[in-house]
Image (cartoon, coloured by chain):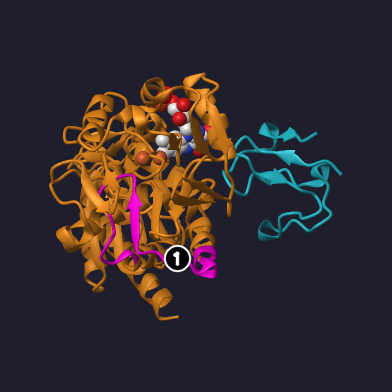
Amino acid sequence: MFRPVTIAEGIYSVGCRDWDIRDFHGYSTDEGTTYNAFLVQGEKNILIDTVKSGFGEEMMDNISRIMDPKKIDAVISNHTEMDHSGTIPLVMHKIGEDKPLYCSKMGAKNLKSHYKKDYNYQVVGSGETVTLGNRTFSFLETRMLHWPDSMFTYMPDEKILFSSDAFGQHYAGDKFFDDEIGEEIMPHARKYYANILLHFSPRVQALLADVAKMNLDIRMICPDHGIIWRKDPAKIISAYDQWSRQEPAKKALVIFDSMWESTAKMARTITSGIESEDVHVRLMNTRKWHRSDIMTEVLDAGALAVGSPTLNNGIFPVVADVMTYIKGLRPQNKIAAAFGSYGWSGEAVKILNKEFEEMKWDMVDDGVKVLYVPDASDLARCFDLGVTLAKTLKEKLSE
Amino acid sequence: MDKWECPCGYVYDPEEGDLDNGIEPGTAWEDLPESWVCPLCGAEQEYFEKVD
Ligand SMILES: Cc1cc2nc3c(=O)[nH]c(=O)nc-3n(C[C@H](O)[C@H](O)[C@H](O)COP(=O)(O)O)c2cc1C
Ligand SMILES: [Fe+2]
Ligand SMILES: [Fe+2]
């Protein structure tokens, strides 16, 4: 849709699409992304968030089609990360550096750490309301969702929630609203949750409870990435509720890498064992799958088998990459087992077990280690490991 | 009793403790178990600063 897009009377989306980006701080963005920024026009003109640096002129052009950008009276910064604050210096320069910049307490601190400027920070906290001309804004701090500075801005008269990164999706396209894109957007929203918010799930639960208690009437949710939820904002809220509860599905993943195919043979056999028990399974080679796509599958997987050959007394570096990444996002309620082929010292399985333990995943047993190339009896042990994983998961789900 | 602030903005208040993580109200900063980390962002105690 041609920018700017009207989202309500006098309220416009003036952000930019980044069609080309494929790696967003280590998250694969196969369909690019968007940096949403919102202009609220009225007796006072307010800009909510900005775009990544490099997109500033395009945002200014979008604003110019509505009004002279110099007439912006104030900026609200919901989040300091540079994909949203990167153009604040350009905007402040254009409108006058004395103009108010509304942000959370941590926002003021973090904006200073990023841009080394003493702007006219107007610190706002949860429950505070600010009236600018004929428009009213209220604020809700959402600390650590997903940065210390993160906050929501809500317009009570219009009933629009500007939710910063929450409820966002990395997606660039010609669709602009949930009703235009339909179900197609959900995998993007899910991937975003799994990769950006999963480790803060208890806080997401608390936030959703707070929002429910506040009885906010939310007609529209405008996140800083992707489409706007205007037809059915409750849909993404209930998806967040579900994802943050981390309930396991009847689904297993076999994540592995392999140098000479021995661990790969084990992985395929474990997969067959899982399938024989009618549990959904996905075999994911860490050099074929991006870590962020593996993470999306981890979100609702009830069981994981992770395999690595032993390399120089450690685990294979690509498996280590994926495990470090998964661990940081702290997935809960998982059943796990390790496996791997080795030649002499064979540390890999032990190291993986330790990782599981640190993540508080339930191990079904000590895992399967095979010396060099697996024979028929080794593969039978692998098949059995798959069966055990699947059965343990089914028992857990029936409890 | 002193309050301590995490770089993420969380403030440990001994009067409140941190019940979600098993810390009773009235637990002084010095008496927190070593394993206790910021309940918001996960930072270890050494990164906290005393609030004046
Ligand atoms: C998704 C994400 C997660 C982050 N997690 C942490 C964290 O757990 N602790 C921390 O101190 N900083 C964290 N940061 C902040 C970065 O370390 C910070 O932005 C840093 O300046 C980035 O350095 P760089 O420009 O070299 O990438 C995180 C940043 C992002 C984007
Ligand atoms: Fe962010
Ligand atoms: Fe973002």
Residue A161 % position (x, y): 40, 55
Residue found at x 72% / y 43%: B34
Does the rendering let one see residue A356?
no
Residue A266 picture location, percent across and down = 25, 52
Expressed as whole percent of the image width and height from the top left, the position of residue A117 reads: 52, 20
Q: Is residue A381 visible?
A: yes
Q: Is residue A252 above or below residue A100?
A: below
Q: Which residue is mark 1?
A: A245
What is the letter of the cyan chain?
B
- On the image, the x and y values in percent for residue A367 come to 40, 55
Quarter of image, res A57: top left
Q: Quadrant of the C terminus of chain B?
A: top right
Side of A53 where A173 appears, left or right: left
Q: Is mark 1 within 8 Å of ligand 1?
A: no
The magenta-colored residue range is A209-233
- The reply, left or right, for residue A149 in relation to residue B38 is left
For chain A, the rendered hue is orange
How many residues crowd around disc 1 within 10 Å: few (fewer than 14), some, or many (20 or more)?
some
- Indicate the amino acid at tag 1: Arg
Location of residue A123 by image quarter: top right
- The stretch drawn in magenta includes residue A308: no
Q: Nearer the viewer, residue A375 or A304?
A: A304
Q: Nearer the viewer, residue A90 or A277?
A: A90
- Secondary structure at badge 1 equals helix
Is A262 on the left-hand or right-hand side of B4?
left
Q: Is residue A309 above or below residue A141?
A: above
Q: Split into 4 quadrants, where in the image is the N terminus of chain B?
A: top right
Q: In the depicted view, which residue is nearer to us: A53 or A21?
A: A53
Q: Residue at x 83, y 47 (%)?
A: B28
